[in-house]
Image (cartoon, helix red, strand yellow):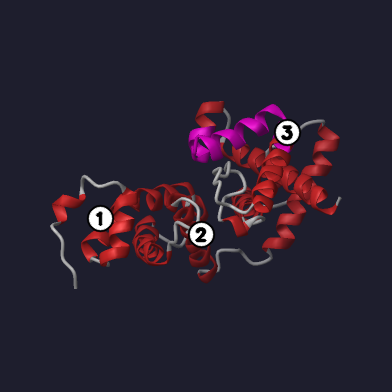
Amino acid sequence: MNTLNYPSLEGKTNEELFTLYKETHAQEVKQELTMRYVYIVRSIAYQMREMYHDFMQTDDIVNEGVIEIMRAIERYDESRDNKFETYISRRIRGMVIDMMRKNDWLPRNFHRDSRSIEQATVELNGRLGRAPSDEELAEYLNMNIKKLQKIQRMSNMVNVLSLDMTYDEGNEALLQIPSLDHSTQPEFSFIQKENVRALTEAIEALQEKEKLVISLYYVEELNMNQIAEVMEISQPRVSQLHSIALRKLRKFMGDREGA
């Protein structure tokens, strides 16, 4: 096994370390790269913790995420994939969801309950002339409010995944602006630009609070509690606005695909 003077690696850029690892496959280089990207695992684990906190610990997510980073370093190809930060972020999110699925993260009758909540939201919105509160929804559905909020959180994650994975070929999250890589095939670059243009148009059509939630969550990378503090509303209301916005965006993009 190749060995290097480990302290000498600290002054190298991430790109230089990837090049060095391809040349040497030295474990010291791999360890240095792994430690530099652990913050991504912690960030994603923190953002998604309300989805898994009932049956998994954040430390479990981080430990598995470190292993996933090491695997990703082996498989990453900068000539084919996008930035490693984007590449590993998607892999970590997928890893967390896989762990949640293995732990039966979707409650029994989830899809039925989720549809009931959506239908009740529409019906109450028509009656009240505004978005119903969680308390009003729970009373209307004769559902425990904690169960309702858990279903809403799970629905949010399902919606995020469905939207985020729509254009998986590019290894870019749909709500991230793709990098302008001139080596990319012109056709794919055109499709990316069209998707971004269409999505930007869809976001602009959202209501102001919905746009703000999308911006704070995906651009500023705040979690739901932080967004609630910024907007001075409840965390469940943030979650509701997030879910509504995603459904609108998915419908817009779906209608566009079918046009």
Q: Main secondary structure of the magenta part?
A: helix
The percent position of residue 208, horizontal first and vertical second, equals 68, 27
Residue at 62 percent of width and 51 percent of height: 160
Q: Can residue 225 be seen in this view?
A: yes
The magenta segment: 202-227
Dot 1, how many residues are within 10 Å of its Cα: few (below 14), some (14-19), or many (20+)?
some
Which residue lies under the disc numbered 2? 80
The percent position of residue 167, horizontal first and vertical second, equals 65, 55
Depth check, mark 2 against mark 3: the one in front is: 2
Residue at 35 percent of width and 64 percent of height: 70
The circle drawn on residue 32 is 1
Q: In screen coordinates, is 160 left or right of 98? A: right
Which element is circle 1 on? helix
Taking depth in this image into account, of 61 and 25 the one nearest to the observer is 25
Which element is circle 3 on? loop
Q: Distance between the residues labelled 2 and 3?
A: 34 Å
Taking depth in this image into account, of 174 and 184 the one nearest to the observer is 184
Taking depth in this image into account, of 118 and 143 the one nearest to the observer is 118
- As drawn, 11 above or below 129: below
Q: How far apart are marks 1 and 3 (CA)?
A: 43 Å
Q: Is residue 213 magenta?
A: yes
Which element is circle 2 on? loop
Q: Do the residues labelled 2 and 3 touch (CB within 8 Å)?
A: no
Image quadrant containing the N terminus? bottom left
Q: What residue type is labelled 1?
A: Glu
Which residue lies under the disc numbered 3? 206
Q: What residue type is labelled 3?
A: Leu
